[in-house]
Image: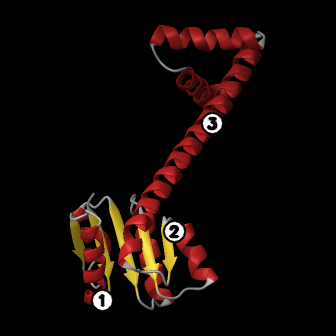
Amino acid sequence: MRIAIIDTSTTRAAIISDGLREAGLDDLMLIDPAGPLVAQIEAAKPEVVLINLENPSRDLLEDFFAMSRALARPIAMFVDQSDAEATGAAIDAGVSAYVVDGLSKQRIKPVIDLAVRRFQAFSRLQRELDDAKNALAERAVTDKAKAILMKRRQIDEPAAYALLRGQAMRTNRRISEIAEAIVTSEALMGDME
């Protein structure tokens, strides 16, 4: 597992690196926090990003939170001090593990494991939510297309659905694609009767 380490202190970065190596993780990349973070992380292609900040300012935290929103990777963040607002902002930004005043060699590996699992769970939930939203949108378009067919052809709902399904099968397309074409056509041509 490749891990990118971002730390404002080289001494702490060395402690983190030692702890990870002792845990059997030796594919480590040190990222310069003064440089362009996203570009460095994209170049390093890590599977996990570990951030350690001694006493982060609100602006620095915002920069890291903006970066975490842009990355599609598990992020574990260690800070020496925090408040409820910063913790909430970290969660909203997608930080998978946010540990306050808890950096020690033996805790690094379990926190990274937790961050990876939480990221995977969140990603799975996000995919399921996106799938559900898409299914609802397709259903709404299909219902609208059925209503158009029912009105134009003077048929009932099962007959309208059968028309949609038959056209989808003949053209080797999805029912929602056929429905979208009908709705679009109706929007463009509906007033031409």
Pick whichever of labels 2 and 3 is earlier in the sequence.
2
Three-letter amino acid code at the position of disc 2: Ala
What kind of residue is marked 3? Answer: Ala
Mark 1 residue element: loop
* Residue type at the position of mark 1: Ser
Residue in view at x 61 percent, y 33 percent: 135
* Residue at the image position 53 percent from the left and 14 percent from the top: 168
- N-terminal label among 3 and 1: 1
Q: Secondary structure at mark 3?
A: helix
Name the quarter where the C terminus is drawn.
Answer: top right
> Where 38 falls versus 136 (above or below)?
below
Q: Position of residue 7 (x, y in %)?
A: 32, 82
Q: Which residue is mark 2?
A: 93
Image coords of residue 128 (percent x, y): 56, 41
Per the model, the C-alpha gap separating discs 1 and 2 is 23 Å
Residue under numbered circle 1:
9
Please state which of residues 181 and 174 is positioned toward the viewer in this rendering. Answer: 174
Mark 2 lies on a secondary structure that is helix
Q: Which residue is mark 3?
A: 137
